[in-house]
Image (tube, coloured by chain):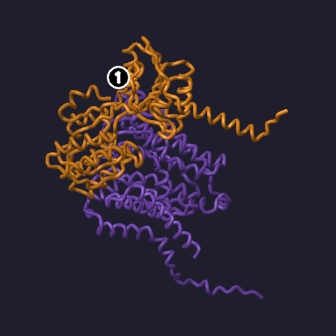
Amino acid sequence: MTITDTSSAAPTVRKLSSLQLASRYGTMLALLLLILFNLAMTPNFLSWQTVNVNLTQVAAIVIVATGMTLVIATGGIDLSVGSLMAISGAVAPMIFLDTLVPIADPVLAVALAFVLPILVTMAFGWFNGMLVTRYAIQPIVATLVLFIAGRGIAQVITNGNLQVFKNPGFQFIAMGQIAGIPAQVALMLVVAAAAFAVMRYTMFGRQVLAVGGNEKAARLAGIPVRRIKILVYVISGALAGLAGLVVVARNSASDANLVGLGMELDAIAAVAVGGSLLSGGRANIIGTLLGALVIQLVRYTLLANGVPDAAALVVKAGLIVLAVYVQQRADRS
Amino acid sequence: MPVFSRRTFILAASALGALSLAGTAAAEVPALKQKQTYKVGFAQTESNNPWRIAQTDSMKAEAAKLGYQLVYTDAAGSAAKQVADVNSMIAQGVDVIFLAPREEKPLIPAVMAAKKAGIPVILLDRSVDPKLAKPGQDYLTFIGSDFVKEGQRMAEWLAKNANGKSKIIELEGTTGSSPANDRKKGFDEAIKAAGNFQIVASQSGDFARDKGRQVAEALLQAHPDADIIYAHNDEMAIGAISAIEAAGKVPGKDIMVLSIDGGKEAVGLVAEGKIAAVVECNPRFGPKAFETMARYAKGEKIEPWVINDDKFYDSTNAKAELPNAY
């Protein structure tokens, strides 16, 4: 006779192993350690200007990485974000500089310069989503298409030329302040908070996680898997477009060859360091925010202490390896 | 009946091959006849930035002035297309080829093909791999700026005009690139010789505006006592200016910005007083290029590196020179 003993399953408060703790709070801990290290070692670290510099520099990465977190939560990946940034960064100045069609009303021109480039990158995001769902191409290959072609498109529409501009209305997104907070930092916080709320409190959020956790089960449960997947690529495209606008506005210049170059890797790194599984089914928005901050602060620390840029890349890689290691061990135990 | 074994055949063949190789390697650069007018080729590498466009315009203008026929091609950033461009110039029978090589190694076949066809090649602004092709042997000469000298001139100007400022942040170009290495070497050595100055930080900004700005923001925060920023190109200098303004300081007053390249935007900023001085990296190759060609036709011996002279902009001449900047 087999009797299943259920007594051990009695609700006891299970103690988290140290690895699980590290996985849950590791990014936060790393950030605190970095801040402590800087307080001790880096000259003039303790000032608002330091906070300001780091938050404004990390804003674009966080905005892109938020979209990337959603894509990764469905088990996908979006390599095209850097190229999409270049496209929106190239299109926006063309609108208010009247390169395309003369727009008489400057307010309308600036409004269009915000809206149109993001619509364009959303369309490209939709294209990514179609490749992934309808044509069942692996996400890494599907988004590789626009990773390569996207920058080419940006170069073709600008002829590869640098566009230089001065437009306070448009540049408010990166130079302005909202209640003392730099506009791009406010934007970053709004994006991250919205994504956090969506993932935690809406059905869409649950559906994203379900698709990433077990796609077949999700489909059998009646979740519109295709629509959800397309939607996350569209969101990722929109956020990449927004980040592209921030970058060109901050520099008063748009260079199709350089805007967003390498951004896909920074964003993926932020997601990985932040504790979201790259295999999908989990979306840790706060983690991504902290992960991006850790990477930014590492770069700042090394720069401010005179360590060459090449070393910063090695440290960044080391951080990713460490984060992935901790996660895997924590999941196994 | 004598039978050649395969081995002797291979030996003989390779000996012949070696001979013919030695034959071409020893030959001189093809001569150039003195004529009333010439048909010259100019193989541009790309034309996506003001510097390249200024270079092309200068070559075209000088050719038109002399009444020469110019065969112009644009490789659009592709080394393979540039090789094809040079081959088509050879087929068209030009007298001289001016080549701005896209990359060091891939353009070697083009240089060699021209030599074989009896057409002298003059390299502009970039050189080819010195191990595979030599000036005075495979190509006539290299015409270009002296990057070490550019850094040196900036340091010497600074030594005279620093006005008590002394702590320098250096924004380097792309790590390992020759302009970055040379502009650093020239500046650092000359500034050390001048004494009184201290380079408090030196980091790469990748010749890019966005990266230059981010690096400048971090370095200005870590070294608030710095009062000079020396950038290896205009783009990083412009990025640094926006970093200085973001830090609540005034470029030109609190912090002196120095740059190399001398494009129109930077010279305009010199006129506004935001950049203190710019050494130009001269894109106007026309006069020097055609002058060198004429000297060679006359039978003069040409030095392996013809230096293209650079202008210098500071507050004394920026306004007047602005229309001439590229």
Q: Position of residue A237 (x, y in %)?
A: 50, 47
User: In the figure, A76 relative to B270: above or below?
Assistant: below
Quarter of the image for residue A106 reads top left
Closer to the camera in the image, B301 or A327: B301
Q: For the C terminus of chain A, which image quadrant?
A: bottom right
The chain letter under disc 1 is B
Closer to the camera in the image, B82 or B121: B121
Count the marks: 1
Quarter of the image for residue B20 reads top right
Give the residue displayed 27% in from the left and 26% down from the top.
Answer: B323
Give the residue displayed 58% in from the left and 34% down from the top.
Answer: B22
Chain seen in purple: A
The residue indicated by pointer 1 is B287
Q: Position of residue A324 (x, y in %)?
A: 53, 66
Quarter of the image for residue A292 reads bottom left
Q: For the N terminus of chain A, which image quadrant?
A: bottom right
Closer to the camera in the image, A192 or A198: A192
* Residue A200 seen in the current view: no
From the image, state the color of chain B: orange
SS category of the residue bearing label 1: helix
Query: What is the residue that sits farthest to the top in this orientation?
Result: B36
User: In the figure, A229 relative to B238: above or below?
Assistant: below
User: In the figure, B305 relative to A73: above or below?
Assistant: above
Query: What is the residue that sits farthest to the left in this orientation?
Result: B163
Q: Position of residue A235 (x, y in %)?
A: 50, 49
Q: Name which residue type carries label 1.
A: Pro
Q: Residues within 10 Å of mark 1 (few under 14, many from 20)?
A: some
In this rendering, would B285 be left or right of A219? Answer: left
